[in-house]
Image (cartoon, rainbow, N blue to C red):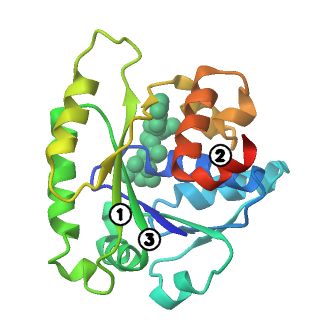
């Protein structure tokens, strides 16, 4: 399955999610190929950092400026994860035309809802971006949700996302704001590698299982 992790707004958590998901999938026994289409190269730098420090499993991540549809579709029998950035819109659109699904991380704020709305407008089925394949599922989820339940922004953002045309599903599994995501990333580790029993690891596990339910079924 080809999953593109995308949103227009910088810092929404695309690379963090792509990286953690890649390692999680490999640890579940899946073959994973990553593509990093962002000139910032965060996803591929993280893969290289793991190589340098000798952490296993290592990741296969291609850092490219453009990706051909045929290239993405050629990977059979493995999970393809594509990290993109707004700095390379052409590549972002190209990858999205081939995707089975587009995973959209959204931090809890009104500005992020607006940015997501703009993004959905750009990728809408009537636009050139989707001319090859109108079957993509667009799945949004809250990243950096407030850990304090009394703060309303997370709930309000989720409600707002549900009303946006172009979003097929808002995941109930949120990723909360946890410094462990930032700290593990700087060590080239997934959050569940660095702190296996942490709340962040548990939340990430629920999130990943929801995205890959066949793995969840095998495990339970
Ligand atoms: N749930 C989270 N809790 C805490 N920190 C997070 C979380 N998700 C991401 N971060 C941190 O936020 C920062 C930005 O995340 P990331 O680089 O993944 O965003 P991005 O969408 O890829 O940004 P860009 O558009 O610049 O590529 C990183 O330092 C990352 O570790
Ligand atoms: Mg990034």
The CA span between labels 1 and 2 is 20 Å
Q: Residue at x 37, y 11 (%)?
A: 148
Element on which disc 3 rests:
loop
Image coords of residue 86 (percent x, y): 31, 62
> Which quadrant would the N terminus be assigned to in this image?
bottom right
Q: Mark 1 and 3 residues: CB-CB less than 8 Å, in contact? A: yes
* Badge 2 residue CB within 8 Å of ligand 1: no
Q: Nearer the viewer, mark 3 or mark 2?
A: 2
Residue 187: which quarter of the image? top right
The CA span between labels 1 and 3 is 7 Å
Return the residue at label 2.
216
* Number of other residues with Cα within 10 Å of mark 1, as a class: few under 14, some 14 to 19, many 20 or more: some
Return the residue at label 1.
137
* Number of other residues with Cα within 10 Å of mark 2, as a class: few under 14, some 14 to 19, many 20 or more: some
Q: Is residue 217 left or right of residue 210?
A: right
Image coords of residue 181 (percent x, y): 56, 32
Q: Residue at x 30, y 71 (%)?
A: 89
Q: Residue at x 60, y 61 (%)?
A: 44
The CA span between labels 3 and 2 is 19 Å
Q: Foreground: 89 or 20?
A: 20
| Mark identifier at residue 100 | 3
């Amino acid at each position: 399955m080809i999953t593109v992790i995308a949103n227009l707004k910088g810092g929404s958590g695309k690379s963090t999610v792509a990286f953690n998901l890649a390692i999680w999938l490999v640890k579940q026994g899946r073959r994973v190929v990553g593509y990093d289409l962002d000139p910032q190269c965060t996803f591929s730098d993280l893969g290289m950092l793991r190589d340098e420090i000798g952490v296993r499993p290592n990741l296969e991540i291609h850092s490219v400026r453009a990706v051909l549809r045929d290239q993405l579709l050629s990977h059979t029998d493995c999970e393809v994860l594509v990290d993109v950035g707004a700095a390379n819109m052409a590549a972002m659109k190209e990858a999205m035309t081939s995707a089975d699904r587009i995973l959209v991380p959204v931090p809890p704020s009104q500005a992020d809802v607006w940015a997501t709305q703009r993004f959905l407008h750009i990728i809408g089925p009537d636009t050139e971006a989707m001319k090859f394949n109108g079957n993509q599922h667009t799945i949004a989820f809250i990243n950096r949700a407030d850990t304090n339940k009394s703060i309303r922004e997370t709930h309000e953002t989720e409600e707002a996302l549900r009303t946006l045309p172009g979003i097929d599903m808002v995941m109930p599994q949120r990723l909360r704001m946890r410094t462990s995501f930032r700290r593990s990333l700087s060590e080239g580790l997934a959050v569940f590698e660095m702190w296996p029993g942490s709340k962040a690891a548990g939340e990430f596990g629920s999130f990943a299982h929801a995205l890959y339910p066949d793995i969840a079924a095998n495990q339970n």
